[in-house]
Image (cartoon, coloured by chain):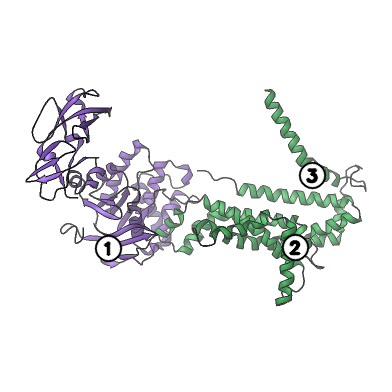
Chain colours: A green, B purple
Amino acid sequence: MRQGRLVRAAMLAGFAFLWLPILLLVAYAFSADRIPFQWGGFSLRWFHALAADERLVEAALLSLRIAAGAASLAVLLGGAAGWALARFGPFRGRAVFGALIGAPLVLPEVVTGLSLLLLFVALDILTGWPAGRGATTVLLAHATLGAAFVAVVVQARLAETDRSLEEAAMDLGATPFLAFRTVTLPLVAPALAAGWLLAFTLSLDDVVIASFVSGPAGTTLPMALFSMLRLGLTPEVNALGAVVVIGVGAMLAVAAILLRPRRG
Amino acid sequence: MHGPLRSAGPPMLLRAEALTRRFGAMLALDALDLEIAEGEFFALLGGSGSGKSTLLRIIAGFEAPDSGRLLLDGHDIAATPPWARPVNMMFQSYALFPHMSVADNVAYGLRRAGVARGDIAARTASALAMVGLDGFERRRPHQLSGGQKQRVALARSLVMRPRLLLLDEPLGALDAGLRERTGFELRALQRETGAAFVMVTHDQEEALALADRVALLDGGRIAQVGAPRAIYERPASRFVARFLGAANVLEGQAAEGRFDSAEAAATFAGAIPAGTVAVALRPERIRITADGAGPNTAQGVVEDVAFRGDDSLVLVRLSGGATLRVAHAEEDGAPPERGASVCLAWDADAVVALAS
């Protein structure tokens, strides 16, 4: 049993390493003291202060809008890409297509951000769109990143789904569109929903890419937080962190439930 | 095998004319002709790569032939998409929709066809009753055993009242014990519904046991087609003789009603037409005797003996060099020992002349 105890201790140490900083952040959000790492008794004052901070609330709302838009666009693009990779057979350029779709997963965010910035600037000069940079360019950049994740999730789901299901539907009188709507779509719907949540979370978290492609009117929540760091932290940031941690945690839990292996 | 394969009997339902299909360099179907009558149980038998699955998928509409015609009731359906054909298929994997209940699976095709709501319920219930699954309506596919899944897949196809039901390896995924029973049930369902069943299988026993007629495919062509007993007893070629029942095939020269085989060091007497290039001899038609001479006998040494329950398979190396498979029935006493010298004898009507 010595080994069992050792394994358990190692696991606890691992969890502590991962979760202690986050737990501390959430705990100090409820501290009354002005200094973010000094306990001053339980209080909700920083949550009230957060709600009253117009700049942060506005940034949070913008972030949520961008995340929702980027996630939706990512599901459309990534879903189509995952479908093509899983079902179109060995078409010409498939390997290149797959590599390009997955590129944002492995490229450093700095590279992705910089390349997107160059693209947007060049487009602006050549076509006049997008006029300047702001929320739109951040949304497009996040959709690119999110589409990579959605494509991977959808492709994996389709790969474990029997292809003859679609043929069976057509054999029973369904046109390809009806077969897609009544059989394929319900089967990949959990993957699409999970992909949407992943893309949403990624967009909400991102500060690097957003910093590159954003403009004056496009300050997202992580960007606002980052700039607050330079002026000195208040426990308001802890309160915001707690809200984000709980929100993101809930979404990841939902994604995990949607992606759990099918029975049978 | 060009020209009509059948002249009398029930009216023709499906007719394939010179169907050809290539996949890259591989010729999956090579100008294949085939006729299937109304209400018959037909088996497409062949090894992997014989073209049997491609033919099934062309009849279902999932593949298009490169050339040739496919006639259903005299109308060319080669260009008709699968959802518009009065043909249904039972998939090897059963392809039950995992997100639907058993009843919704069976009702799927009826809904697509726009059948009235009340009729859908009634027809779904009677289809499930027909396969013995009443009371399973609300189950999900993952809650069913393999045999039950197979029945749901059958009910889902038969509820459409197809003229022609295609079955892709229908017994392939079942346990050995369940196969025999399910085979009899399939035949009963086929008689009950009056639909023509076309089954694809690689298992010759399955094909011989279930089908009214069997087509043995080889390299995208039909090697032989006919009633199971006819093609088993009268194989037309070396390939058919070896595939069905693993007959012994011996090469040699035909001369005036006799066939001399050097590799068997024996002479075969019987119905040997001119142009015979080989003869087939079924393992169960060969007797092991103490001594013998003359035509339709051979001498050899026992190479190995394998006990198979109701008989023993004896491998006998003949003095001419060929090895014969001999089935030695249990009621004929103990089989010879390994290394024993034996005489083999067979009746003239056991000799099957092969022209190719």
Where residue B309 sits, quadrant-wise, is: top left
Dot 3 surroundings within 10 Å: few (below 14), some, or many (20 or more)? some
Q: Which residue is mark 3?
A: A22
Where residue B233 sits, quadrant-wise, is: top left
Tag 3: amino acid:
Ile
Q: Is residue A40 above or below residue B26?
A: above
Nearer-the-camera pick, A227 or A93: A93
Location of the N terminus of chain A (image quadrant) = top right
Q: Earlier in the sequence, mark 3 or mark 2?
A: 3
Dot 1 surroundings within 10 Å: few (below 14), some, or many (20 or more)? some
Q: Is residue B135 left or right of residue A113?
A: left
Q: Does label 2 lie on the same chain as label 3?
A: yes
Nearer-the-camera pick, A55 or B137: A55
Q: Chain of mark 2?
A: A
Q: Which label sits in the foreground, 3 or 2?
A: 2
Q: Which residue is mark 1?
A: B18
**Marks 1 and 2, how far apart in space?**
61 Å
Q: Secondary structure at mark 1?
A: strand
Q: Which residue is mark 2?
A: A114
What x and y, as percent, mark residue B155?
A: 37, 50
Residue A175 numbered mark, or none = none
Which residue is situated farthest in the bottom direction here? Answer: A127
Tag 2: amino acid:
Leu
Q: Is residue A47 left or right of residue A204?
A: right
